[in-house]
């Protein structure tokens, strides 16, 4: 693990921020504080952070309906995100996007997307720009999106145009409520991606270091002009497909086992403390800082202004 102390602290802070963000939303949605459909990212933090720690504002990502973790990992303002989800006009998208449509173009975050598989073509479009600027474009998808025709067409076009696009498939083993083993006809999504003619690898999505190292390899590969690549990340989600999902498709005790054995935050803590790269007190201090940030963000969001009827036609179209 060749990471500086500062880099390790940054990576853990990003993962913990995503976890605390999602857990607070889970609680507030149950209390009726937040309206609308929400899909939580908790459990998959090592994927978003392991990918985005390599990226700068000029690199692009396109997210999914489960997009909060991608936004935070790419540098979007956490307070602005919570205000957006609470429906405030001070939110990142002025309270009009909500959970599934947060975007921050200045950070290279081209938006979450409520349509499964719809992000991949957008990432290809961004990849055309990235090819001319020496950057990369990242399409985040789940195991459900790997079966969509839009994704297939985007992967083929990226190969044909030799674009620096990386297709990141976060395999949390449930396409909504259907097990991956039943829904994916190929041997694996890695094998299928390779069939399009691109470099395709797999990494351990609950281990930040596995994701980080694999992405370093792919980014270097794409920036060298070799065309697109794909990575399948074996991960888990700790909540339902959406908030309110009863998760009857889960086995008895499955979630308890995953939280105990396959929690990426626990894996990170164990690795860095055993290697004496960080101490437990360092991680505990970050936990306290992050919890205070989320608490402040929620307090500000509850009292922040809301859009009015006068704002309904604003930001609908862009003039070039």
Image: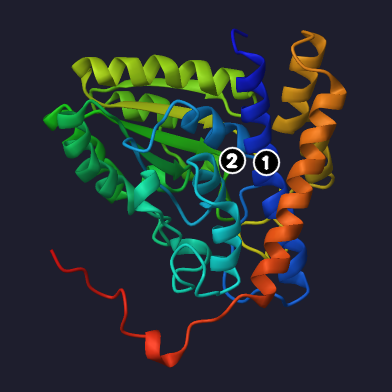
Task: Kindly identify which residue carries mark 2.
Answer: 172
Side (left or right) of 58 relative to 78: left
Which residue is found at the position 80% from the left and 19% from the top?
Answer: 270
* Residue 155 x/y as whole percent: 25, 36
* Residue 46 x/y as whole percent: 61, 32
* Residue 164 x/y as whole percent: 25, 28
Q: Is residue 187 visible?
A: no
* Residue 105 x/y as whole percent: 34, 51
* Residue at the extreme right: 281
Image quadrant of residue 263? top right
Can you say whether 49 is above or below 67 in the image? above
| Closer to us: 45 or 115 | 45
Label disc, if present, on residue 268 of the rendered structure: none
Which residue is found at the position 62% from the left and 39% from the top?
Answer: 44
Side (left or right) of 314 relative to 209: left
Which residue is found at the position 78% from the left and 51% from the top?
Answer: 292
Image quadrant of residue 217? top left
Q: Are marks 2 and 1 in contact (CB under 8 Å)?
A: yes
Can you say whether 57 is above or below 261 in the image? below
For label 2, count other residues whose C-alpha is less than 10 Å away and answer few (under 14), some (14-19) or many (20+).
many
Side (left or right) of 262 relative to 48: right
């Amino acid at each position: 693990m060749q990471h500086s102390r500062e880099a390790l602290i940054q990576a853990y802070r990003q993962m913990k921020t995503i976890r605390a963000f999602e857990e607070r939303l889970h609680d507030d949605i149950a209390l009726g504080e937040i309206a609308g459909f929400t899909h939580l990212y908790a459990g998959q933090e090592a994927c978003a952070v392991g990918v985005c720690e390599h990226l700068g504002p000029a690199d692009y990502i396109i997210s999914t309906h489960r997009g909060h973790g991608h936004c935070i990992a790419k540098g979007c303002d956490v307070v602005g995100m919570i205000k957006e989800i609470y429906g405030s006009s001070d939110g990142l998208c002025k309270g009009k996007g909500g959970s599934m449509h947060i975007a921050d173009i200045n950070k290279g975050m081209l938006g979450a997307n409520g349509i499964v598989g719809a992000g991949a073509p957008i990432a290809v479009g961004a990849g055309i720009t990235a090819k001319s600027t020496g950057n990369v474009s990242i399409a985040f998808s789940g195991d459900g999106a790997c079966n969509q025709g839009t994704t297939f067409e985007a992967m083929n076009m990226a190969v044909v145009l030799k674009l620096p696009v990386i297709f990141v498939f976060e395999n949390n083993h449930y396409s909504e409520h259907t097990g991956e083993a039943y829904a994916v006809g190929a041997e694996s999504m890695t094998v299928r991606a390779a069939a399009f003619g691109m470099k395709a690898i797999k990494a351990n999505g609950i281990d930040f270091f596995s994701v980080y190292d694999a992405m370093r390899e792919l980014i270097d590969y794409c920036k060298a002009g070799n065309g697109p690549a794909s990575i399948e990340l074996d991960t888990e989600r700790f909540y339902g497909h959406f908030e309110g999902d009863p998760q009857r498709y889960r086995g008895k005790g499955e979630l308890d086992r995953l939280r105990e054995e396959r929690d990426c935050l626990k894996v990170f803590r164990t690795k860095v403390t055993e290697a004496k790269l960080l101490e437990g007190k360092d991680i505990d201090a970050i936990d306290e800082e992050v919890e205070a940030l989320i608490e402040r963000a929620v307090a500000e969001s509850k009292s922040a202004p809301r859009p009015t009827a006068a704002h309904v036609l604003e930001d609908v179209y862009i003039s070039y």
